[in-house]
Image (cartoon, grey):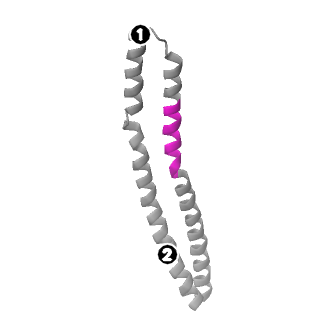
Amino acid sequence: MSNLNEMKTQLEKLSNLKFELESVIGDVNNKTKEIKYDDTPMNIYIHVESLAEKHGVDITYEVNSVREKVNELESALYELVTPFEDKKWEVETKHDDLECDIEEIEYEYD
């Protein structure tokens, strides 16, 4: 029966870790969404575009390249959450497996 108690203790720890990871995932998502509202790159290339236009310089290619890179950066930042989601999945799997093991043991004792 001691083993069962240890398993239940471990199950509780996994439950707490699942909850904690859900919270962390929310924090990561909230933080990475900040890039969506950051207009610094846009302000820079708009300013430079106006200078280029004023001086007859074509920077269309460069501005398009910057926009593409900003979009890539945004996507990369959104992907920062993936390792946390993977860890949560791993913990959920361990939790579910342990929960099944506990139920089997309890069923045997009934």
At 51% from the left edge and 51% from the top edge, which residue is drawn? 81
Q: Is residue 1 shown to the viewer in this render?
A: no
Q: x and y percent of residue 68 in the render?
A: 52, 28
Question: Foreground mark, 2 or 1?
Answer: 1
Pointer 2 residue: 13
Q: Which quadrant holds the C terminus? A: bottom right
Question: What's the amino acid at mark 2?
Answer: Lys
Location of mark 1 (residue) = 55
Q: Is residue 71 above or below residue 1?
A: above
| Residue 75 on the magenta segment | yes
* 7 inside magenta stretch: no
Query: In the image, is residue 86 above or below residue 69?
Result: below
Label 1: element kind: loop
Placement of 67 over or under 37, stated as above or below = above
Query: What's the mark number on residue 101?
Result: none
For the residue marked with disc 1, what is the amino acid? His
